[in-house]
Image (cartoon, helix red, strand yellow):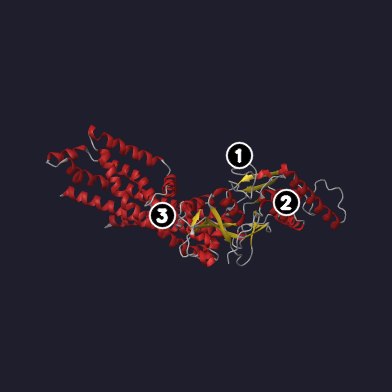
Amino acid sequence: MRKALIASLVLAAAAALTVAATATGARAGASAPAAIPGCAKGSLNLLKEGTLTVGADNPAFPPWFGGDEKKPWKISNPYSGKGYESAVVYAIASQLGFTKAQVVWTVVPFNNSYKPGKKPFDFYITQVSYTPERAQAVDFSRGYYFVNQSVVARKGTPIAKAKTISALKAYKLGAQVGTTSYSYITRHIKPSSSPSVYDDNDKAIQALKVGQIDGIVVDLPTAFYVVAVQLDDGVIVGKLPTKGTKERFGLVFQKGNTLRSCVDRAIGNLWANGTIKKLQNLYLAKAGAPDLT
Amino acid sequence: MGGATVRVSKEARTVAIAFVSTVVFFGLVAFGITRSPGWGELKAYFFDWGIYRDSFPEIAAAFWVNVKLFLIAEVFILPAALLLAVLRSLPGPVFFPVRALAIAYADFFRGVPTILVVIMLGFGMPALGVDGVPISPFFWAVVSLVLVYTAYVSEVYRAGIESVHPSQEAAARSLGLTRGQALRSVVLPQAVRRVIPPLLNDFIGLQKDTALVAYLGVVEAFRQSQINNAATFNFTPYLAAATLFVLLTIPLARFTDWLVARDRRRQQAGRLA
């Protein structure tokens, strides 16, 4: 499985290289497999030369990160190359000509990812949603995943029978602080009792278990993980419809970092050559959840 | 007459010097900060007036949760802590178990991190699934704060009780008061009066620790700031929460100052009579 994945990445990179080479007219003897013209590894604006330093939150949760936990990483290991976000990062790295060993992961709590001052990473990846307000403080790459929110509850509770958004209004909902899941509750569901807000999904799940809240709102891939692993009697009530513009996850950059344009083009290639679709099928695609209307 | 003029001009000079020195000092600090290379960024991240104005009403509304929490908790803390302190001061071998329990209680709840008590009770008690056990996070937050702060405050009371000279009690007993009466009408009034400033300390600490209820999902001022912070990636909302806490603390501090000053006046008046 892993071999097949790496092989497919190499293939994808090679394909992109061919395309780029044809486009620029036989760029001779590139030493590294840099697929993107103007983005040679040596010319990139990096924290540490020759190394791609990637920030991520700890614990690293599936399905975004995979593999067995290895210090300092908890639950999963970004170095594994498994899990959607880990795989996307290594695909981007290979597009830019980095080997797997040249990618270094560093633990950065979400709230530190956007604090002022010099950032301790080249870019940051942990399901950060793009919003125009946030883009005032940091730069975002183009989207590597488009998100749907969903509702998770316990089997057999009244909320589990809800078919519409308005049916959710009567229940006490919870979400993780700072997430678009929370804004979805306050902006679109508008429940009659104010939602509870937790530091992370673990606490929200704990509150759901003991009955302090009736349901939690999380993005759909996380919902699958929650019901499969974290909540024995969990059930996905349904997928929430997209409101307004499509929500997307982007990589976070120091404002004005020139590295972004090269990463954007790498992500563009990954969409174009089907790598992203393939990785989504591999890590995120599961049996569909019912749609809430 | 001439002496008064000298005094006035001297006073004016003192005021003038204090004024100039203050202006120069803060002027230099302000200059240093605003000239530093990162000032523009710092200002944008922490002092964005537009964001402050927009987030203030929401945070003020959430602050009401903090106010309810510490007011309710303090009502239980003050008498419970006094009781604990008195129990700990009981003399004689008969009361050893009571003293031991009081000491164990104070040691444990002062030592254990408050956040742990909040989590243990807030998530743990509802998990028992026993009928009649409340599941409300707010309820368990109040219980946690009462447990922890009773331990702190009991030590403050104890310090006050022990600061009253034993001759006071001896004098009271010699007038025919029982031990209980002496404690109630002679020792405690003096003890409590002396510890009002540290009591206020703990009350302010309690106000700030109400933010721990956020861990259980309740949206209070600090959590609301965090929500606004995460929505904008700007830290100014925390400043709005800080304003509210400070606005509450300053009048309280002045009130205690006044209380202490009034007591001192009365005591000195008594001495003269």
Q: Is residue B232 visible?
A: no
Residue A147 position by quadrant: bottom right
The quarter of the image holding the C terminus of chain A is: bottom right
Marked residue chain, label 3: B
Marked residue chain, label 2: A
Residue of label 3: B136
* Image coordinates for residue B60, horizontal then vertical, percent: 44, 62
Marked residue chain, label 1: A
Q: Secondary structure at mark 1?
A: loop
**Do dots 3 and 2 share one subunit?**
no
Residue extending farthest front: A156
Crowdedness near tag 2: few (<14), some (14–19) or many (≥20) residues, C-alpha within 10 Å? many
Residue of label 2: A92
* Image coordinates for residue B84, horizontal then vertical, percent: 29, 43
* Image coordinates for residue B113, horizontal then vertical, percent: 43, 43
Give the residue at x 80% y 46%.
A32
Residue B164 position by quadrant: top left
Q: Is residue A241 above or below residue A175?
A: below
Q: Secondary structure at mark 3?
A: loop
